[in-house]
Image (spheres, coloured by chain):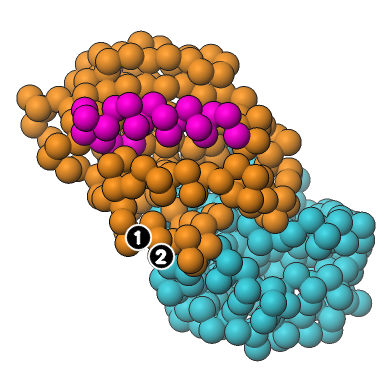
Chain colours: A cyan, B orange
Amino acid sequence: MNNIFDFVGGDGGQWKVKEIKAVIGDSLENVPYIKIIPGLTLKSNEGLWTLRGVSSNLRYTEKDEEDKLVAIQAGLGRIEATCAALIPIHKSEGWWKLAQDERRKIFETQSRHINTGLKYLPAIARRLYHCRDYNEPFDFLTWFEYAPIDSDAFEELVGELRKTQEWKYVDREVDVRLTRNRLYDF
Amino acid sequence: MNNIFDFVGGDGGQWKVKEIKAVIGDSLENVPYIKIIPGLTLKSNEGLWTLRGVSSNLRYTEKDEEDKLVAIQAGLGRIEATCAALIPIHKSEGWWKLAQDERRKIFETQSRHINTGLKYLPAIARRLYHCRDYNEPFDFLTWFEYAPIDSDAFEELVGELRKTQEWKYVDREVDVRLTRNRLYDF
């Protein structure tokens, strides 16, 4: 089972870039398109940059929270979800040196990360890719898909998360907004 | 910071293989030596097999447990620790589908994994390498170093862990015993 994916910024792909904006720290180089391809199929020299991530097991979510999420969340690829955001995030060494219970406390007890995401389901579909263990420039690639009508709700969601205690540990964040490229033959 | 390492089974290396034994499921092919090298420096066709792992952040250990571990654990590479064990482990899909709190409960509340390890510190030095997110045949490479005089204690430690509830989720385990190769020029 291959859960590894490459996000290739370049001149073609399923998603057309509307804007790339640095939120914290350095931005990513501008590209017109992003192509998402199964990991390890990447040809060398393809694209201007590549971010690799892996869809993995839950790291903080507890059973009762997972049950709530599974009951209402939507999958990726809905026909009406023509908007997307790729938000790569890097957290400080201070975060990674915390023990599991300390990170969980900041993540959910204080910052309500899971509960905030829940409020925007099923409108905002999400997937988390991990990259910290790949020597990558980011720790996570967060991916969101939603319909144009839910754009305001999406801004509210990212605004809420960025005000949390958890976000004090984010030392690099780039916000890439995209629209589906209907002409792309996957 | 590169935390990725390759364990190369072949005809040379810092560690001489005494025995390779399948505990659960398939074994690994026999090799005379194991060489541990920083990840991404591997030449192709080197060795008979390679296992890749990454030393990562704590996944279950809580702050009070970490404090106890840090206070008494020994580092790798002690001159007297001429014995080592490489025990690659794979856990079932049933394990990985559990939420974080369910896995923690089995790992520590029921199986006392951390507390059992603590009893054998500082004699048995340990390091955990993660490989599940690398499309590898194992989920973890567990590595132990100890002096010959602590061999019985080491057998006791692995014996205790293998009787736990957590081990019911282990569906492949290979036990590789090694002695330091003093002739190897690292």
Quarter holding the C terminus of chain B?
A: top left
Q: Is residue A130 visible?
A: yes
What's the magenta bit mostly, secondary-structure-wise? helix
Is A110 rendered above or below residue B132?
A: below
Tag 2 subunit:
B
Q: Secondary structure at mark 2?
A: helix
Q: Residue A163 falls in which quadrant of the image? A: bottom right
> Picture coordinates of residue B3 (x, y %)?
35, 51
Mark 2, Cα crowd under 10 Å, few <14 / some 14-19 / many 20+, is: few
With respect to residue A164, does A16 lie above or below? above
- On the question of residue A180 being in view, the answer is no
Q: CA distance from mark 2 to mark 1?
A: 5 Å
Magenta-highlighted residues: B144-164
Q: Residue furthest top?
A: B30
Q: Amino acid at mark 2?
A: Asp
Q: Which mark is residue B70?
A: 1
The percent position of residue A21, horizontal first and vertical second, equals 58, 80
Residue, x 8% and y 31% (percent of image)? B185
Is A59 in front, or is B67? B67
Residue depicted at 85% across the width and 74% down the height: A120
The image shows residue B141 at horizontal and vertical percentages of 43, 35
Q: Viewer-proximal residue, A111 or B8?
A: A111
Per the image, is A95 magenta?
no
Residue nearer the viewer, B55 or A48: B55
* Residue at 34%, 32% in the rendered image: B153
Question: Disc 1 marks which amino acid?
Answer: Val
- Which residue sits at x=73%, y=85%? A160
Q: Quadrant of residue A161?
A: bottom right
User: Is B167 situated left or right of A153 in this image?
Assistant: left
Label 1 marks a residue whose chain is B
Instruction: Specify the label residue B67 is tagged with.
Output: 2
